[in-house]
Image: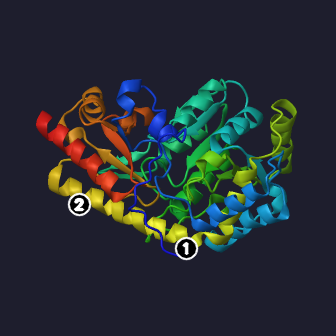
Amino acid sequence: MSYNLDKFISRRNTNSVKWEFMPTVERKEKADLLPLWIADMDFPCAEPILQALHDRVDRQIFGYSFAESIEYLDSVKNWFKDSFNWKFNSSEIKIAPGVVPAISVLIRTLTHSGDGIIIQNPVYYPFKEIIENNNRRTINNALINNEGFYLVDFKDLEEKASEKNTSMMILCNPHNPVGRVWKEEELIKMAGICLENDVIIISDEIHCDLLRKESEFIPLGSIISDDRIISCTSASKSFNLAGMQIANIIIKKEEFRHLWDDDILGKQGLYGSNPFGIVATIAAYNQARSWLKHTNQYIDANLQYVMEFLNKYLPKAIYKIPEGTYFAWIDFRPYGLSAEKLETLIQKKAGVLLDEGYIFGKEGVGFERINVACPRSILKDCLERIQKVISDSV
């Protein structure tokens, strides 16, 4: 089945966060802004997913639903076995309304107030928020920026992991926003440092299917069997299902699963899942692999387009095509603009809303994250607007 990802589908009047509920933006500005910020796609879902949802609607009743059916659990297990040769048991899958809520639960249940939790800036900014909102301390093992290609500072990680009351690390793989897909030797070394210091690892692997054709994603749990590793997955990014609010958390340690249940069920009373999220995930994992392949190819071409555009029109910008995700992470610092000036130019003058680099930590100041999972015409418009305002200002 072929998919026309060049076609623009309006998302206004659909309660879209990306297009209608933009933070820090005045209402009068929203109608004219071009949003390439939050991490969802402007592509239609795969036809098998749409058909599964239509079929579910035709059943006419939408009562309380659980995702723990054999069909659902098998779809998750088989996807990771077939895609990444990673095997786990159905009993090890816990269902959450999303990866971020799941990480928050794991922080509360597996660490203590005041504990240190390692992240690797510049990194997905909700990590820091949920750590500190749960009265834990953020410990930054900042990545090393090697002309746009990021590396782990292992010496610093050893020091941070060995500190008293450091109890957890949140690993992002593929890394958002820098796009690294960590190699096996990097994963083994990071995990070894953490586990030797009894530091639990939460591996956020939500972008695992969004890869360049030459990249290989390795689930941390597939190469290291230690049950202090917890993996967070979802079909939401891969198949554009974020609004379905369902994620799969792989917890191997029985004690951790009991603590999870006590928090999710006993304290929060979060019973069941969105019935549409259940059928959409099953259809995605069982029937939509060809759509994902086609979509990854389109994203590859969009990321290459960004490279060609910058080389021609904004040659001082530093950008490397990411190994994974659908984000272009662009360093505009060579143009000598402050982060505030850059944001003002892009949002107020160009009418483009991006995720500003500084929200990912001080290491991101002067950068912009562009979500390229959109029709080429939207991406072209975005880049042309940015080029004009930057060129006119320097």
**Is residue 161 shown to the viewer in this render?**
yes
**Is residue 318 shown to the viewer in this render?**
no
Residue holding disc 1? 290
Q: Residue at x 79, y 48 (%)?
A: 62
Give the amino acid type for the residue marked by disc 1 in the picture.
Answer: Ser
Disc 1 residue crowd, few under 14, some 14–19, many 20+, Cα 10 Å: few
Q: Is residue 282 left or right of residue 175?
A: right
Residue 226: give x, y in percent of width and height.
73, 56
| 301 versus 245 height, above or below | below
Residue 262: quarter of image = top right
Observer-nearest residue: 227 or 47? 47
Coloring scheme used? rainbow
Residue 139: give x, y in percent of width and height.
55, 33
Residue 197: give x, y in percent of width and height.
66, 44
Give the amino acid type for the residue marked by disc 2 in the picture.
Answer: Glu
Between marks 2 and 1, how big is the CA–CA gap? 27 Å
Residue 330: give x, y in percent of width and height.
31, 47
Q: Is residue 388 left or right of residue 79?
A: left
The kind of secondary structure element at disc 1 is: helix
Residue holding disc 2? 308
Q: Is residue 54 left or right of residue 329?
A: right
> Marks 2 and 1: which is nearer the front?
1
Residue 53: quarter of image = bottom right
Q: Is residue 356 left or right of residue 252?
A: left
| 114 versus 285 height, above or below | above
Disc 2 residue crowd, few under 14, some 14–19, many 20+, Cα 10 Å: few
Query: On residue 350, which mark appears?
Result: none
The kind of secondary structure element at disc 2 is: helix
Say whether disc 2 or disc 1 marks the residue closer to the N-terminus.
1
